Structure formats: structure tokens, C-alpha cells
Amino acid sequence: MCEWRHTRAPRDVHTARFEPATPAAAADGEEEHVSVSSATEVVDPVPGAGAPHLPRQPDLVQLLTPEGERVEHPQYSLDLDAEELRDLYRDLVLVRRWDVEATALQRQGELGIWASLLGQEAAQVGAGRALQPGDMAFPTYREHGVAWTRGVDPLHVMSLFRGVDNGGWDPVATAFNLYTVVIGAQTLHATGYAMGVQRDGAETAVLAFLGDGATSQGEVNEAMIWAASFSAPVVFFCQNNQYAISVPLERQSRVPLYQRAAGFGFPGVRVDGNDVLAVLAVTRAALAAAREGQGPTFVEAFTYRMGAHTTSDDPTRYRLASELEEWKLRDPIARVKAYLARSGVADADFFTAVEAEADELAARIRRGTTEMPDPPGTAMFEQVYAEQTPHLAAQQAEFEAYQASFQGGGH
């Protein structure tokens, strides 16, 4: 079980002035007193502003080191049996294989675009597995790992990126809303849904996903204002993959993202987003607090986007190869595999079986994607309203007449 202390951070942590020590103070040998958030490091200046002094990155909540060593945390504990640990590893491997296969299919012209989650598997699987059956998740367009944990068929996600439909899964049956491409809009949907279940008296929680870039959007800030004002049972889960689309984090915010929560009046916590155990523990605790009526929480999963923002992006234009190599050493799957092998929880036969299952999944995804039939052109009129309006019916009739004009016309 996770231990959760839903208390606000000390005031000085969130309101510290980011000013370097004066030369006079240093010369006099006076001891400099600064909080964690006021220790500074100089980064490239932001255009139109003086060189910012950003707070040093604080420690992460971590339960599994990059080397696969299990560690304890004073506020978050997690007790999983051997089968649950193996299941998490299986989730990570299968989700990554799905992602790799989807990227290959897009490169071969079978998908219009693909938003890869490579490197973010632990953040998504850990958060998804923290949800209870009655909880509701609101994704962006990258939460394939969360979709997996909610029982969504990968082919229903693939059909969206192939342009066959707008998403083939039932949000009610899966408790997983349809993908949202408008940046940050899903946080408003999630907050409204949370306020609804709150008024229904349901003991459920809502998990709203967003990226670091979305924290600059007005919708996200509006959602957090409403969530705080009404103590809505929603958890804002931010996958900070460092670059939004192409802008590094230090150009987006002068404070760590999780500290922004204090300005809205609710707790924030930063977790190692490449540690599936820590993500599971932190998100489970935040959701439990929401169900108990303690209001929203902001979880910053500190991770890294190993691939491109989407398959139309070229990340070599804005980041160094050396940085990518450094993050490869923090791979979320490798650390779990090392821990399972070292602790005797899993053997070689288990790992071989998971790889074989991943191969089968990839083959099913490839076959199912390439065999998807194109929908009829009139299908776009069938999913607009529950009941077709006269105006829409007229549009459909005009479209059908236009299409019929080409029959036998040599076109």
C-alpha cells in the first residue's frame, strides 16, 4: 500500500526569490541561506528577458534505480507480489513493441502519422495500472500505454491513425476517453467529468494526462483553477518528456512544473517517470486522495521522449545525440528486467516467452492494420450527431449526388 500525506509544501519552497548571492555577501564570508528551489543554475537566456536562474532540479520519487536496484522512499511504499511484478514487465515490453511496429507501419505508408511513446512506457503503464475499474482516464494522443492497461484493442487505436475512424473503442466500457489532439483540452473535459461524479456522490477519481508543453496552455490553467476551487477528484498527470514539440523545458518554465500546483492551492509531486514502480505508487496515492475528497494533485513524471514528437518531426534539429545516449542508460524496461532477474522473480524462460508474445502482437497489429477496409465516404455524416439534422442530411444528399456523377464517367 502507498502512504500519502496530502499536505502543501512549505511556503518558502514555492515563493523563493531566484536571485544569485551578491558579491558583497560572498566577500564577507557570510553563509548563504537558500531553499532547494532557490539554488540556481544558469541556462541560455530567454529572448526578451535577462538570463534566468532556474532552481536546481529536486530529487525524484524513485523506487527502482536505473541499475535495477530496489530502494525505499519515506512517503511512498509499494508492495507487489511476483506475479504483479512480472505483469508490469510484460506490459512494458508489449506496449513498446506495439509502438515500434506502429512507427514502422507509418514509415511504410500504412498510417498517416504516429505519436510515439518510446521511453515513456513506465510513466503510462504505471499510471494506467494505478486506476481502479470505476476511475476515468482522459488521454492526449500519445497514451497508447494507458489504453493498453484499460483493455483497449491496439487495432482500435491504429484505425484512428490510419484515418479509418475517430477511435474505435467505447469510452464508457473502457473508462478511457477518446484521444484529444487539441493540446490541453482534455484537462477541461477531465475536470468537468470529475465535478460531475463528485455531484453524483461516486467514490471514483479521474486521471487527466498532459505533456510539459501543455502546461503553457490556457485550458490547462483554467482546468486547474476549477479543480482547485471545487476540490474536484482529478489528478493531473504530466509526462514531462523535456521538449514539448521542440522547446526545451528551461525555456518553458522557470520553476519545476510540479511546483506550479502550489499556486493553484493543491499538492504537486515529481516522480521518476522511467520508474514504473514509483509512478504506480505515486499515482495510486494521488488517486486515493482524490477519492477521499482531498481534491486534485499534480503529478510530474520526469521522463524523456526517446523518439520524435510525431513521425513528421526531426528531433536532431533541436537536441544532441549525446543527450539521447545518456537517457538510454535510464531505460524504463531495462531496469525492471535487471531487477526481476537479480531478485529471482523471473527467469530466462519468462523473458523468452514475453518476447515471443510481443512478436505475435506485432504480427497481429501489422496484419490487422493493413487489412482495414476504407470506410465509405458517407460515414463522415453518421458520427456527427446522435440523430441526423435536416441540414446534415442535405449535405449528405449533395455529397452522394456528387459521388454518383463520377460513375461510368471514365474517372
Image: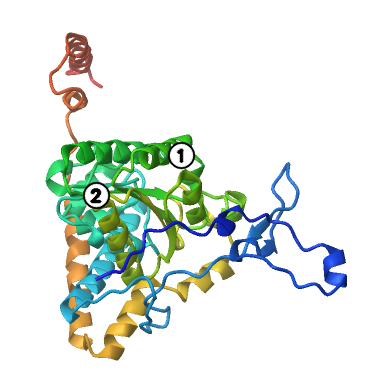
Nearer the observer, 130 or 178: 130
Who is closer to the viewer here, 246 or 26?
26
**361 above or below 404?**
below
Q: Name which quarter of the figure residue 226 lies in.
A: top left
Q: In this orientation, which residue lies closer to the viewer: 171 or 286?
A: 286
Specify which label sits upstream in the sequence, 2 or 1: 2
The location of residue 7, given as percent across then percent down, is 41, 58
Q: CA distance from mark 2 to mark 1?
A: 20 Å
In the picture, the disc for residue 135 is none
Q: Nearer the viewer, residue 300 or 285?
A: 285
| Amino acid type, mark 1 | Asn
Q: Is residue 367 left or right of residue 34?
A: left
Relative to 399, is 217 on the left or the right?
Answer: right
* Residue at 73% across, 44% down: 49
Q: For the point 73% across and 69% down, which residue is it? A: 32
Q: Secondary structure at mark 1?
A: helix
How crowded pointer 1 is (Cα within 10 Å; few <14, some 14-19, many 20+) is rated as some
The residue shown at (17%, 13%) is 389
Q: In the figure, is residue 300 to the left or right of 289?
A: right
Q: Which residue is mark 1?
A: 221
Name the amino acid, label 2: Ala
Place of residue 321 in the rendered image (x, y in percent of width and height, measured from the top left): 56, 67
Whether residue 219 is visible, yes or no, is: yes
Judging from the image, the colouring scheme is: rainbow
Question: Is residue 301 at all visible to an observer of this figure?
Answer: no
Q: Position of residue 249 (x, y in %)?
A: 56, 54
- Disc 2 packing (10 Å; few <14; some 14–19; many ≥20): many
Q: Quadrant of the N terminus?
A: bottom left
Q: Position of residue 57 (x, y in %)?
A: 57, 65
Question: Residue beneath label 2, please?
Answer: 205
Residue 318 vertical placement versus 321 (above, below): above
Question: Is disc 2 placed on a helix, strand or loop?
Answer: loop
